[in-house]
Amino acid sequence: MTTPTEGQKIVAERYLAEAVAAAARITGLADTVAPRPIARVAVIGAGTMGSGIAMAFADGGLPVTLVEQNSEALDRGIATIGRTYESSAAKGRITAEQAQERIASIEPNLDFAAVADADLVVEAVFEDMDVKKDVFGRLDALCTPGTILASNTSRLDLDEIARSTSRPQDVIGLHFFSPAHVMKLVEVVRGDATADDVIATAMDLATTIGKVPVLAKVCEGFIGNRMLTPYRREADFLLEEGASPQQIDGALRAFGLAMGPFAMADLAGNDISWAARKRLAPTRPKDLRYSRVADTLCEAGRFGQKTGAGYYRYEQGSRTPIPDPIVDDIIRTCAQEDGIERRTITDEEIVDRCILALVNEAAALLGDGIAQRPSDIDVVYTHGYGFPKDRGGPMHYAENIGLDVVLTKIREFEKTHGRVWTPAPLLVDRVEGNHSTCSAGR
């Protein structure tokens, strides 16, 4: 695991600047397609995501109607928004006048029908398909023709959501990242029926409010979370095989990631990914290895920072992760029950398995046409998932170390760990077909 040279850092910086510019371009979209005018936005849900999304649009100069179903939740959301803007003004990031203008531009409302005059409605409710379909059915009945209906879902099937309306052409995904008013990345997810002008509007609007949009097609997890699944799989397996949460997090931070997978999981809430695993459990191949460590922690109520315990424990009022012997015991018990022999794990193996899992899945989704170009994947990971910008993103990193080297390592992992490490066909083609990169262009 070598540190990038100053020259490599400069190249990566230039590459990412070009990649961000390229990501805003929509392949195959006619120049005659014009964005729809957006004068007012409505956001459904005043929780952490909904409040952040409302602020993101307010920051971009758009009036927002923030809709919530109960007064306590709405009051909490508005109070959070007020504190956030007042804090920004106190720190000199915006003026006191700007803070008050933005607070005033967000109109709280307990009446769902208040969405009717919006040109764009963004749903930011609980990540449950039935809940989202109910919301979209109600929006379909209330909103005027031409209103864009967007979901903030992070991994659910957007096409199924769209089918709960009579206007699937107007449905799109706008996956903001938390905190939504701070994080730059927005995954714009096009459904099978999404109209071209809706796609153009979403990409243009995201840029207008200061975000970095990346277009994706529909699949489980889209770009970012689809790649996160094998990354976490390897981190979980490495736990059972002998590494500790702090060793894995430390090795990946040393590589340059902003946070390791377990500290990040504790921050996000382990119950979120647990819900996704339970939803996907019926389709999980029974012959594939599955780590029970994360599920066992959740069954014990260890959801992360919000419960004071997850992969680490946390002192009251502190976000500092503290290694916990209870977690070590859970890991050892799961490994023993599953017949996994523990051994010494090197930091190099941790980095190779976690990062190359990202690369292999990225090549697979690129081959599936989920992303427009490899550089889009690098934008997603450097702007939304804390991948080190001085390494340029997973795809740029893979090209730097050599795709032939990457493929050789992946094949070695396949021999040891089975078919979860089957090389992506595009990666094989690029190496054995003598292509120098994972795509002919960026």
Image: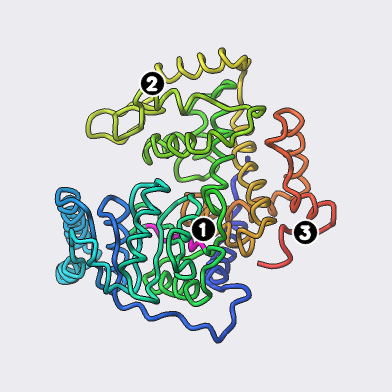
- First along the sequence among labels 2 and 3: 2
Q: Which numbered disc, 1 or 2, marks the residue closer to the eye?
A: 1
Q: Main secondary structure of the magenta part?
A: strand
Q: Is residue 135 left or right of residue 237?
A: left
Q: Position of residue 31 (x, y in %)?
A: 57, 84
Left or right placement of residue 352 versus residue 114 in this view: right
User: For mark 1, does the 10 Å Cα neighbourhood hold few (<14), some (14 to 19), or many (20 or more) residues?
Assistant: some
Of tags 1 and 3, the one toward the viewer is: 1
Front in this rendered view, residue 294 or 439: 294
Q: Amino acid at mark 3?
A: Ser
Q: Amino acid at mark 1?
A: Asp
Q: Residue at x 49, y 55 (%)?
A: 160
Q: Quick check: 19 left or right of 441? A: left
Q: Please report the residue visible at 52 percent of the width from the left and 57 percent of the height from the top.
A: 380
Q: Which residue is mark 3?
A: 436
402 in relation to 240, above or below: below
Q: Which region is colored magenta?
A: 183-189
Helix, strand or loop at mark 1: helix
Residue name at image x 40 percent, y 27 percent: 298
For the residues labelled 1 and 2, the Cα–Cα distance comes to: 42 Å
Q: Secondary structure at mark 2?
A: loop
Q: Quadrant of residue 161?
A: bottom left
Q: Is residue 18 above or below residue 368?
A: below
Residue at mark 2: 324
Name the residue furthest bottom.
Answer: 32
Instruction: Say which residue label 1 marks.
Output: 159
Which sits in the foreground, 123 or 361? 123
